[in-house]
Image (cartoon, rainbow, N blue to C red):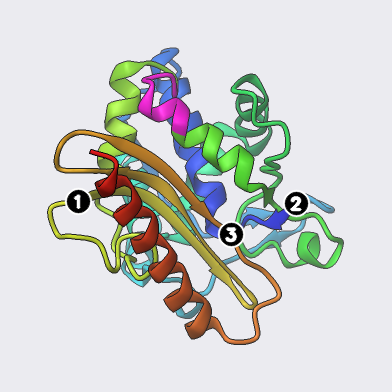
């Protein structure tokens, strides 16, 4: 089943950035001049993002200034910054992230565009995902196969700093680490990631939802399901 990817599409973009850095196209510690003007994939017309619609508005104060690529990647994941995302997508190319997903075996994830491309949204050109492909991508990370072992570890470290923790981690023990990426738009709420138990065992959990009428109830249910799965793994010692 396909879902609107919402911000879960930022995980493939993160992987693509590390892949290109590993190939020597740039260094993660290089800097970009932050911009807030992007081109629609429909007709190339310009559009900008509104900080009031972004979960990380502080970056807008740095438009025109240089910011490290690593810092943009970090904000893209932990604060789900849309402005950081679009700057990184312009750097690495959505089509390249899409190609990398295919190379990893994730055949149904579609990374078509940046965030808030209204013309593309109206034309039905949306980033999409499936639970299976999300599972595959996070499994590759645990195996050290998201680019390479070093890059996989760095990606997991960033994902562990996620600031939105009301679903998978919400009801888990504080000693449990979760490397995950959330996503939400109206009627859609997702969470996908790696749960790392104190004894070192790991499992991947993906929860996607759509056509929600009660967002709060859905979030609460996902947190409860996450706890049930965690309790099951504890019982398997």
What segment is highlighted magenta in the picture?
Answer: 139-146
Residue 158 image point, x, y percent: 28, 43
Residue at the disc numbered 1: 176
Q: Is residue 85 above or below residue 92?
A: below
Residue 203 image point, x, y percent: 37, 39
Closest to the observer, 67 or 1: 1
Asked if residue 175 lies left or right of residue 76, the reply is left
Q: Which mark is residue 160?
A: none
Of the image marks 2 and 3, the number of the one nearer the N terminus: 2
**Residue visible at 37% across and 61% down?**
228
Residue at the disc numbered 3: 208
> How far is the residue under mark 1 from the one under mark 2?
30 Å
Asked if residue 4 lies left or right of residue 158, the reply is right
Residue at the disc numbered 2: 1
- The 10 Å Cα crowd at callout 2, few under 14, some 14 to 19, many 20 or more, is few
Closest to the observer, 57 or 205: 205
Indicate the quadrant containing the C terminus: top left, top right, bottom left or bottom right: top left
Of the image marks 1 and 3, the number of the one nearer the N terminus: 1
> How far is the residue under mark 2 from the one under mark 3?
10 Å
């Amino acid at each position: 089943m396909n879902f609107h990817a919402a911000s879960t599409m930022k995980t493939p973009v993160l992987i693509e950035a590390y892949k290109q850095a590993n190939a020597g196209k740039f260094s993660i510690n290089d800097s970009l001049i932050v911009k807030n003007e992007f081109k629609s994939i429909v007709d190339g017309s310009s559009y900008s993002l509104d900080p009031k619609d972004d979960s990380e508005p502080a970056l807008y104060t740095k438009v025109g200034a240089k910011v490290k690529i690593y810092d943009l990647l970090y904000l893209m994941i932990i604060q789900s910054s849309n402005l950081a995302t679009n700057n990184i997508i312009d750097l690495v190319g959505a089509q390249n992230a899409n190609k990398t997903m295919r190379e990893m075996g994730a055949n149904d994830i579609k990374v078509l565009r940046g965030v808030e491309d209204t013309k593309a949204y109206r034309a039905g050109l949306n980033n999409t995902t499936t639970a299976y492909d999300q599972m595959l991508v996070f499994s590759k990370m645990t195996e050290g196969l998201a680019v390479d072992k070093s890059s996989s570890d760095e990606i997991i470290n960033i994902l562990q700093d996620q600031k939105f923790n009301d679903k998978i981690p919400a009801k888990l023990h504080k000693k449990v680490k979760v490397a995950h990426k959330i996503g939400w738009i109206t009627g859609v709420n997702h969470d996908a990631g790696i749960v790392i138990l104190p004894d070192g065992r790991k499992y991947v959990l993906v929860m996607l939802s759509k056509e929600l009428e009660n967002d709060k109830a859905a979030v609460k249910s996902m947190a409860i399901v996450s706890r049930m799965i965690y309790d099951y793994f504890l019982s398997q010692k």
